[in-house]
Structure formats: C-alpha cells, structure tokens
Image: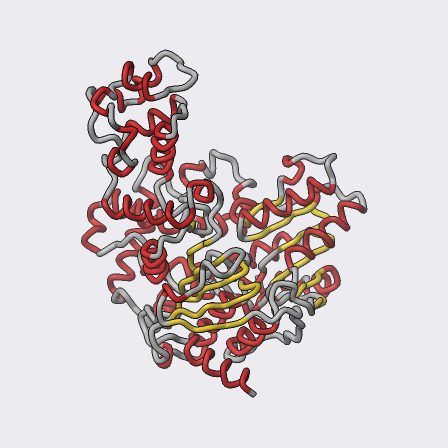
Amino acid sequence: MENLELKNLKNLYHKTIKIFGPPGTGKTHTLVEKVLKKHLNKGVSPQEIAFISFTNKAINTAVDRSLKAFPQYTTEDFERFKTLHKYCRRYFSEDVFDPKDCMIDFALQTKIIKTSDKRLSDDNFTYKDWSVGIYSKARNMLADSIKVYKEESYKKDSLDVFCKKIGAYEQYKKTGSERPLIDFDDMIERTIKEVNFPALKVLIIDEAQDCTPLQWSVIYKMASNVNRIYLAGDDDQAIYEWNGADPKYFTTFFPGRKVRLRKTKRFGKAVHRFSQIIRRGILNSEEKDYECGDKEGYVKRYLNFREIPFNQLEGTWYILGRINRTVNELRMLAKDSGLYFSDNEDTKCFDEKQWEAIKAWTRLCAGKKINKKQAERMYKYIRELKDPSYRTSQFWLSEPNYQDYDFQTLQKECGLELLKTAQKKSWWQILRRNFTPAQISYFIRLLRRYGQQELNGTPKIIIDTIHSVKGGEAHNVVLYGKANYPSNYQTKSKKEKTNEKKVWYTGATRARNTIHLLSTDYKYNYPLGEDYLVYVREKRK
C-alpha cells in the first residue's frame, strides 16, 4: 500500500476532495445533494458512480434521494451504492463466496465456533470472544497480532490462551464445515489480492474516518482507476479505533484538497458549548471553527432516571449508554418508568406478537370483529381453551374462510365456550399463557401512559449505544455516564482518554435541543462528571 500511495500521490491529490464536517454540518447531505446530483446532472451514469458508506441507512438515503431527483433511473442502476463489505462481495461469484459461507457478523463467528466445536468450550470462548476480537483488530490494522495483544491495556486472556484460540479459529474456518468458511476480514484481504476494480467516473466515501488500514488498502486500489474522489468525515467522531480504524488516513495519509463545512444546523448554543468542552480533551484534532444555531437549549444533570422530563419535552429522544451493559440497564429503567421505546434497528420494547393478541382481545370486548390472523395470534395466549388444538396454525389454515370473527362465532365454532363471561374481563385476566407478570405489568403501564393508538406508531424514544446511533440525531439526548468499564478513566493513557472523549462528544452532538446527563456521582462518571462541572462554571461567567 505504501508503494501505491507514493506512486499515485500527486495524481490522488488533484482528483480528491476531502470534506471535513463537524456534527450536524451536513456531510452526507453535501455528498448526496451537491456532489452526487452534480455529476448525475452532467450526464454521468449512476453505474459509473460508487457510493460507499458504513451503514445501510446512509446508502438507502442516497439511493432514495437520487431516485426522487432522477426518476428515469431505477434502484438497479445504483448497484454500486453499498457498504464496503457488500461492495467487495459483489466481485466474487458464489462459487468463491457462497452467501452462507460469509458470517453475518463478528459475534456470530465465535458463536458458530462455540456451538460447532466442543473442544473450544474448554478454552472459554464467549459469544463475543475477546481474543478473536483482538485478532480481527490486528488484521484490520495490518499489524502483528501478538504485538497488538501486548499493547492492549486490558487483557481478558493470557498470551497462551490467545494464541490457542486464534489457531483454533483459523483451523475451524478451514475444516469445521463442508466447505471453508470466510469471515469479513478474509473477504477484504482477498479483494485486495484478486479483484481488479472497473474504471469509474466518481468514488464517494462517507464516514471516511472510520476506515481501517485494511479497508484503506481497498480504497487505494479503487481510487487508482477513478476520475474524481470525494471523502467525507470528522476525525473527532472516529469512535471505532477499538476495531483498528485509523482517522489519520483520512486527515493526513490520503492526499487531497480540504473543504471545511462551517455551520451546524443541528444544535444551538448550550449543546455546542458543552460539546466543545468535551472536545478540548481530544488530542491532535483537526481545526474545527464552526458556528451553531441561534436556539438556546440546555444541558442538565440528574441522579435519578425518573427525574428526566420525558413528558414535558416534545420531539424525539435518544437514551444512550457507553457499552451494551449500561444500555441494558437503561432499558430496565425505561420499562420501570413505563416508557415506549425501541432500539436503533426499530426493535420495539415489547413482544409484538403479544401486543397483537392484546389488540385482538380488546377489539372483541369492544363489540368489533377480528380477522383469522388476529384470532390465531390471540389463541396462543389464552390459557384455558376447550380444545387446545385451536392454538395451532393448521386449524386456522383449514378453518372456513370467515371474513371476520366475533364472540358468537368463536364461542360456537372455535372453542371459546368456557369464556362466555370473558367480555366482562380485562385482557390480562384472559391472555395469561406465556405472559410473565413483569410483561403484563409493563403493558398495563404503557397503555395507561400512552393509550393504544400511540403504541401502534413508531416510538419517539430510542435506547441504544452511542456507536449505534452515530450519524443520527434527536431533539433530546440522555447520556448515561456510569463508569461500567474495565478500567477507571483516570488511570487511562492519553490516547485512551482521547478515544473516550470522542465517544462522549459523538453522543452529545446527537442532540438538537437538550442534553440530559444521567449519573450516580462525579468521581466515576468519566468524562461527563468533569466536563459538566466545567460547563457549569463557564456558563456562570
């Protein structure tokens, strides 16, 4: 890669534009509305444009906006609008990479190993195995795995166990199934060696600061046969260095002319002031002199989850934790408070099959009819039936195709004779099968707080990690600053502290109006405790 970089240094500089944009300044908007549409208006075919991002959401946004502006094209015309891994995958036939051979994600890789090879259970493989994670990080850094292992400040496995696990992992990929298994790192490595990318007019890379050296090797190879290159990113939001990402490739190593976005449209004065205090702790940051909006907003700290004014503030909410463990705690707190929420993948806080059964019973009690699918769903949760066979899908497939079912039909034809007084009872008195007391209690709190109509819609609250919502925004953001991490913030190296600051900076800048800091005490809530105290002092001046 170094030889390639030196050889094409001058050429890359003249054909590359690097867009530096702080949070909310419209990096993706610029790439789609200005860059992409400009080239399409000039007559460049979408098949001559590659648009690479790290989330399917960003890809879908780019395609949807392009289709609206240029209705003469179809989705198939934008076949090169993909995540980097999917883009590489398209250049291999199924004879080389069968979809079933490519692991869905890294966690699944170790899960497959654990369940498929009993010998590895004695080596303490977990669902997301630490040693295999470090091995993947080393491959993405183009570094020796032993060296990367030794540089880790927190070590879950000894060196012997680490080496043993890696050997077992590679051996399993070769011999653990009918044909060799391919992980994502293998695919990228083979792409670099085997794929000759076609000539393109335009290459667009979004969130370029999150690329690893291994992925940059692919980008260098793609760039050698492209007329114009656009890279967009923000080194202060480089929060994937734990997985080998290196923002220096975007800021320094990859040559190009720099364009800086100077105005954030996302947040106002309070959010901007607080986020800049966090940003002071980020070392070697690119210059970021940008303006915020005129709205004020506010930042406030809480010691109790129930103190946060969810009912008083309008708009959407992000409730964010640093790691999955703290996110799970947040979800429990939200359920105790009766909040209606989902994660960033739109998975709701309750079992939607249970919710469909509740709605079906409620309709019956209101004198309305339900369809066959609703009746089938409801019967799975009724504890007492005259004939349990009515729970099975086979019955509903063979049942005469009633347009609708009412109580009379269900009592006469479908085993509800024991429930003649059921209309006088609430759903939690009837739908008790496979419902835990906690689930019943939570549904009751939700219905009292929101009503059925709002629960049918999209939740206004998303609870997830900061990493998961990167690139998104909400009117109000809760940051859970509990220090639930292997080592105390004060004992970390300067680099580790910088990486922590980047995470919290990314989380804080998701907010449009307000930030709510949830913590237990100042000492262990890094870096939010310290930063909030600085924010309060500066606000008073």
Residue located at (29% from left, 61% from top): 163
Query: Can you tell which quarter of the image residue 380 is in?
Result: top left
**72 and 97: which is toward the camera:** 72
Q: Position of residue 275 (x, y in %)?
A: 54, 73
Which residue is painted at 63% across and 69% down in the image?
295
The image shows residue 476 at horizontal and vertical percentages of 51, 62
Inspect this view and state whether residue 212 appears: no
> Residue 20's image quarter?
bottom right
Direction top: furthest residue: 400
Q: Is residue 74 left or right of residue 247?
A: right
Percent position (x, y) of residue 53?
58, 52
Place of residue 126 in the rendered image (x, y in percent of width and height, measured from the top left) = 27, 54
Q: Is residue 415 above or below residue 25?
A: above
Q: Nearer the viewer, residue 481 or 86?
A: 481
Residue occupying the point 33% across, 21% down: 407
Q: Is residue 276 left or right of residue 103?
A: right
Between 132 and 348, the residue placed more toward the observer is 348
Residue at the spot 56% in from the left edge and 59% down from the top edge: 216
